[in-house]
Image (spheres, rainbow, N blue to C red):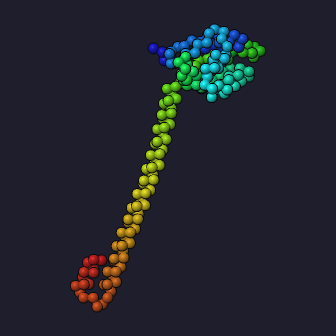
Amino acid sequence: MTAASEAIWEYRPIRGFVRWIKSNSGVPEAQPQSGSSPDLWANRIHPEDRERIHLGFSAALEGQALSWSDEYRFRGANGEFAHVHDRAEIVRDSSGNVTRVVGAMLDVTSLKHTEAALQESNRKLHQLSRDLLHSQDYERRRIARELHDSTAQLLAALSMNLRRLQDSRLEPDRRKQALSEA
């Protein structure tokens, strides 16, 4: 059992890809033959990622970089695209010219799917939080209205009963009843 779904590759600017070793079946099969053109690799990169990867890899080789890495979608032998994290060490001669590039391509498709699921869960959690806050606010307003309305009614009834008590012509039984109601 291997720990990672990875392909190791070696590229030499003059000869192209000279090695392509898969360490596990998780990385899409794309095993350029020895001495093959970089186009065999580039043509398997998803069309939407191809230019970005080509420009980044070329810039690393043409500049003074000692390493390169990126994530992109890579088509396997079955025609399906997998998400890969590709990283490479660039070996240069004393003049700074690239002599070889050794890289490792790691299949991160399941990680990308897990990441997407996590983002969706977070989105749903945020929506639930917003809904909860909205519900709490609505309930607070409803309770406040009820308290306001019932309290206002009680105070109005109390005021009327107290006014009745001020009437000197009120019979003692009626006075007791008004006082009891108040």
> Is any atom of residue 64 visible in this view?
no
- The residue under the point 30% across, 84% down is 165
- 76 left or right of 18? left
- The residue under the point 55% across, 16% down is 77
Q: Position of residue 122 (x, y in %)?
A: 48, 39
Along the viewing direction, whichever of 176 and 34 lies nearer the viewer: 34
Whether residue 87 is situated above or below residue 142 in the rendered picture: above
Q: Position of residue 121 (x, y in %)?
A: 46, 38
| Residue lying farthest to the front in this orientation | 79
Quadrant occupied by the C terminus: bottom left
| Residue lying farthest to the left in this orientation | 173
Q: Quadrant of residue 143?
A: bottom left
Quadrant occupied by the N terminus: top left
Q: Position of residue 123 (x, y in %)?
A: 49, 41
- 6 left or right of 91? left
- The residue under the point 69% across, 10% down is 15
| Residue lying farthest to the top in this orientation | 34
Along the viewing direction, whichever of 140 and 74 lies nearer the viewer: 74
- 155 left or right of 68? left
Whether residue 82 is situated above or below residue 158 in the rendered picture: above
Q: Position of residue 85 (x, y in %)?
A: 58, 23
- The residue under the point 22% across, 85% down is 173
> Is any atom of residue 95 visible in this view?
yes
Whether residue 63 is situated above or below residue 13 in the rendered picture: below
| Residue lying farthest to the right in this orientation | 95
How many numbered markers are drawn?
A: 0
Whether residue 20 is situated above or below residue 109 in the rendered picture: above
